[in-house]
Amino acid sequence: MEQCILIIEDNPDITRVVQYELEQAGYRVLTAPDGVSGLTLAREHNPDLVILDLGLPDFDGAEIARRLRRTSNVPIIILTALDAVERKVSLLEAGADDYLTKPFHPEELVARVKVQLRHQQHGEVIAIGGLEIHPQKRYCQYSGQEVRLSPKEFDLLTFLARQPGRVYSREEIEREVWNGELPQNSNVVDVHMANMRAKLRDLDGYGLIRTVRGIGYALKTP
Ligand code: CA
């Protein structure tokens, strides 16, 4: 089956060249000239990979990457004119899988696309102790048994599991998992944590989620 790649880029010359190269390589290509239409296309067509320009007319590319990440684990390759190291780190933290600095060789981009799609096909697995999370399949198990999580619980557990041991404040969790859309003093995060804990406990998974009093939550390292 033909794999679909979405290019979100406002420079029509770059879009044209990249689209051409990708189509030559056998991919179906969708294009969007700004972040909002890019997010819409991503929602409607569920592409296999997104190529994302950092400097878009409406939104910063990192913000678009973050929004894509909220609902999908689609591989994201960022195109950036910037070369600052700290920017790259923040991009990768925003959920980008790879980045290319402009100007780049279209063939280099196609090679990177292939690498990402291969990873995706193989499927990422996050394994921590007896816990196993398959982000692409949205599947989670504990000691071999499926943990039936709601979509938000799944997002939340995956978020914690990406850096086990790191303590996240409630504010950070609200911002990253709920997109800062929760009302102030909401207990939604705590309720979700309690539900996840109960589900893990049912499978004899005790103490996997740590509460750090006055600070937040962390996934216990094995
Ligand atoms: Ca641009």
Image (spheres, rainbow, N blue to C red):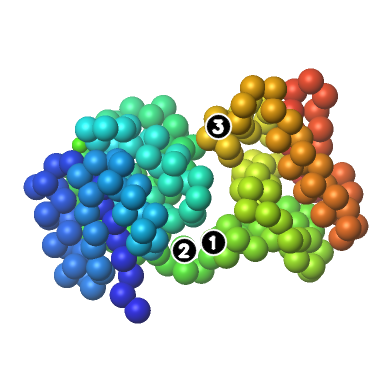
Tell me whether the residue at label 2 lies in contact with that at label 3, contact meaning CB atoms closer than 8 angstroms: no
Tell me whether the residue at label 2 lies in contact with that at label 1, contact meaning CB atoms closer than 8 angstroms: yes
Left or right: 195, with 132 as reference point: right
Q: What's the residue type where badge 2 is placed?
A: Gln
User: Rounded to the nearest whole Å, what is the CA distance between mark 2 and mark 3?
Assistant: 29 Å
**Residue at image location 46% in from the left, 63% down from the top:** 119
Left or right: 12, with 120 as reference point: left
According to the image, label 1 marks what residue? 136
The outermost residue toward the bottom is 1
Query: Quick one: 163 or 45, which is closer to the camera?
Result: 45
Residue 64 in view of the camera: yes
According to the image, label 2 marks what residue? 120
Query: Which of the two labelled residues, at mark 2 and mark 3, occupies the earlier sequence position?
Result: 2
Marking on residue 113: none
- Is the N terminus in the top left, top right, bottom left or bottom right quadrant? bottom left
Of circles 1 and 3, which is in front? 3
The crowding category of the residue bearing disc 3, from other C-alpha atoms within 10 Å (few below 14, some 14 to 19, many at least 20), is few
Q: Is mark 2 within 8 Å of ligand 1?
A: no
The relative height of residue 155 versus residue 131 in the rendered view (above or below) is above
According to the image, label 3 marks what residue? 181
**Residue at image location 11% in from the left, 46% down from the top:** 12
Q: Position of residue 159 (x, y in %)?
A: 62, 43
Query: Quick one: 29 or 152, which is closer to the camera?
Result: 152
Of circles 2 and 3, which is in front? 3
Query: Which of the two labelled residues, at mark 2 and mark 1, occupies the earlier sequence position?
Result: 2
Q: Quadrant of residue 60?
A: top left
Q: Secondary structure at mark 2?
A: helix
Q: Secondary structure at mark 3?
A: loop
